[in-house]
């Protein structure tokens, strides 16, 4: 029996990359007013950020429904299914996957809460792919990735805080401070919780803070890969990669971009 890996679109793998890796994307949805777009399928990343800059109304997002998962599960009746999804503290998508598992009555479907998103989730997906290619069972993969999820973190620098505040991911007080005088808060994402751990004036200094913080972490696991994602900020990303080294690089899609806004940078990594 083979193993099919499912991810939701907030892991920010492109459709082309997912196809090459043998991974199935189950997409979330973005709304601009009464217009609905399927993340990575009916709106490109370029189109989304263009709309973000020109539309008067800010976008909103919708989780994957249980029925959508049921439909996808039915496509793989003879495969074990391992699903790696956005933190349940950030979206109801994982819970939808669990509900669908219960409704279909299959014991070979393994939903995993990644406890993260975007670059952090992509790190877990890569490990799941490696284990699948080594011939591990769905249960073995799910158990290993669940353990790894406890060790994955992200550091994030946002060019503007208004999208996080509007989406309810950060308090308005912290968001206002972040937007004053070009101050860029540095946010740690751990177990699906966002925490401001520092602030610097400008993206350049904020990225330098991120690099210094990671180098100084006593339990930073340098034996594991790192990953980056950004919302069209290649210049600051390249400078950060010179400090930290190469890693998988992703472009934030429309769902993550709804909350991150343009110009953001995320770094995913493991602790020991």
Image (tube, rainbow, N blue to C red):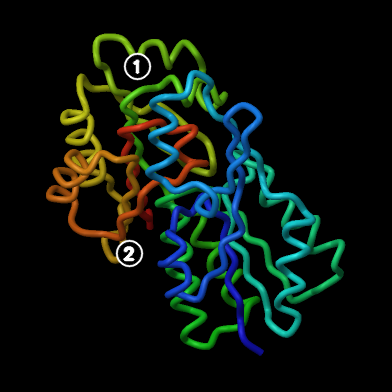
Q: Are marks 1 and 2 in contact (CB under 8 Å)?
A: no
* Percent position of residue 54, x then y: 41, 24
Viewer-nearest of discs 1 and 2: 1
Name the quadrant of the C terminus.
Answer: bottom left
**Residue 134, numbered label:** none
Left or right? Give the position of 269 relative to 136. left
* Percent position of residue 18, x then y: 46, 67
From the image, tell me which residue sits under label 1.
178
In front: 107, or 17? 17
* Percent position of residue 229, x then y: 34, 48
Residue drawn 52% across the image and 36% down it: 193
User: In the structure shown, which secondary structural element does the residue marked by tag 2 occupy?
Assistant: loop
Categorize mark 1 by other alpha carbons within 10 Å: few (<14), some (14-19), many (20+): many
* Percent position of residue 7, x then y: 56, 61
Residue drawn 53% across the image and 54% down it: 41
Residue drawn 20% across the image and 23% down it: 202
- How many numbered discs? 2
Name the quadrant of the N terminus.
Answer: bottom right
User: In the structure shown, which secondary structural element does the residue marked by tag 1 occupy?
Assistant: helix
Badge 1 or badge 2: first in the primary sequence: 1
Categorize mark 2 by other alpha carbons within 10 Å: few (<14), some (14-19), many (20+): few
Seen in the picture, residue 11 relative to 157 is either above or below; the reply is below
Left or right? Give the position of 84 relative to 73. left
Seen in the picture, residue 5 relative to 222 is either above or below; the reply is below
C-alpha separation, residue under disc 1 versus residue under disc 2: 32 Å
From the image, tell me which residue sits under label 2.
224
Residue drawn 21% across the image and 35% down it: 207
In front: 156, or 4? 4
């Amino acid at each position: 029996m083979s193993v099919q890996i499912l991810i939701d679109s907030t892991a920010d793998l492109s459709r082309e990359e997912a196809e090459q890796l043998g991974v199935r994307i189950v997409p979330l949805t973005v709304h601009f007013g009464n217009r609905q777009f399927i993340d990575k399928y009916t709106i490109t990343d370029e189109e989304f950020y263009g709309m973000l800059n020109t539309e008067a109304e800010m976008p909103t997002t919708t989780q994957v429904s249980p029925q959508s998962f049921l439909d996808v599960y039915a496509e793989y009746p003879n495969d074990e299914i391992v699903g790696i999804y956005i933190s349940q503290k950030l979206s109801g998508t994982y819970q939808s996957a669990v509900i669908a598992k219960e409704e279909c009555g299959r014991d070979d479907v393994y939903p995993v809460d990644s406890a993260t998103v975007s670059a952090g989730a992509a790190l877990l997906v890569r490990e799941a792919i490696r284990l699948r290619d080594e011939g591990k069972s769905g249960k073995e993969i799910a158990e290993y990735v669940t353990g790894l999820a406890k060790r994955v973190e992200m550091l994030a620098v946002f060019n503007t805080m208004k999208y996080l505040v509007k989406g309810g991911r950060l308090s308005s007080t912290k968001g206002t401070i972040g937007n004053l005088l070009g101050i860029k808060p540095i946010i740690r994402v751990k177990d699906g919780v966002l925490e401001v751990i520092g602030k610097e004036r400008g993206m350049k200094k904020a990225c330098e803070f991120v690099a210094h913080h990671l180098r100084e972490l006593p339990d930073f696991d340098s034996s594991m890969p790192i990953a980056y994602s950004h919302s069209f900020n290649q210049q600051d990303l390249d400078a950060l990669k010179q400090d930290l080294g190469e890693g998988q690089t992703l472009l934030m899609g429309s769902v993550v971009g709804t909350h991150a806004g343009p110009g953001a940078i995320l770094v995913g990594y493991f602790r020991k």
